[in-house]
């Protein structure tokens, strides 16, 4: 069963949630650099571009709309986040937001980067 989401969530700024992603990872012994690597893998943003999005206080809607290179392998991300199965999310923007949530969750749970980034171990640098 697909759930409907309140569009207000799309107006939340990426800059307000990003520190929470970092904090969640760091509480579990992971690093800000790893969070950034996940975001880069998912969206194609480099550090300078992501910093510009944070400085501009763009909404999640704009953050994903302006992403330079959404990774096609993101469709390999499955499972449940916030009580919702990713495969059942129909709204494209909500799906992108939940992909990011799921990747940060996996990082915080200690999963290896090559598994988080859906790559063979030798491909992760």
Image: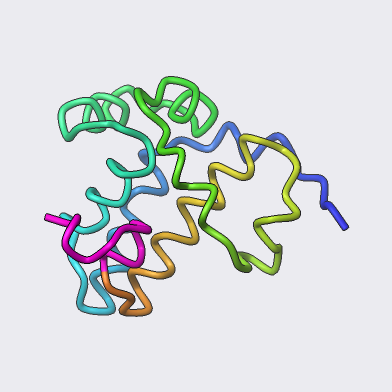
User: Is 27 positioned to the left or the right of 17 in the image?
Assistant: left
Q: Quadrant of residue 43?
A: top left
Does residue 24 show up? no
User: Is 32 positioned to the left or the right of 56 in the image?
Assistant: left
Residue 41's place in the image compared with 77, above or below, is: above
On the image, the x and y values in percent for residue 99 come to 51, 51
Residue 92's place in the image compared with 116, above or below, is: above
Q: Nearer the viewer, residue 95 or 112?
A: 112
Check residue 104 for magenta coloring: no
Residue 97's place in the image compared with 120, above or below, is: above
On the image, the x and y values in percent for residue 95 come to 62, 45
Residue in the picture at 26% in, 27% down: 55
Check residue 124 for magenta coloring: yes
Residue in the picture at 60% in, 67% down: 79
On the image, the x and y values in percent for residue 104 come to 39, 62
Residue in the picture at 20% in, 32% down: 46
Give the total number of marks visible in the rendering: 0
The quarter of the rendered structure image containing the C terminus is bottom left
The magenta-colored residue range is: 113-125
Q: Residue furthest left?
A: 125
Does residue 87 show up? yes
Q: Nearer the viewer, residue 73 or 69?
A: 73
Q: Quadrant of residue 111?
A: bottom left
Q: How is the image coloured?
A: rainbow
On the image, the x and y values in percent for residue 101 come to 48, 57
The quarter of the rendered structure image containing the N terminus is bottom right
Residue in the picture at 48% in, 23% down: 62
């Amino acid at each position: 069963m697909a759930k409907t989401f309140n569009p207000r969530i799309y107006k939340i700024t990426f800059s307000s949630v990003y520190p929470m992603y970092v904090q969640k990872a760091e509480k579990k012994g992971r690093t800000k650099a790893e969070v950034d690597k996940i975001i880069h893998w998912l969206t194609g943003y480099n550090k300078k571009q992501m910093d510009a999005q944070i400085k501009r206080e763009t909404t999640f809607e704009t953050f994903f709309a302006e992403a330079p290179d959404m990774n096609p392998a993101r469709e390999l991300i499955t499972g449940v986040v916030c009580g919702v199965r990713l495969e059942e999310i129909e709204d494209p923007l909500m799906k992108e937001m939940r992909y990011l949530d799921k990747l940060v969750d996996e990082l915080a749970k200690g999963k290896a980067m090559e598994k988080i980034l859906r790559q063979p171990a030798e491909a992760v640098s």
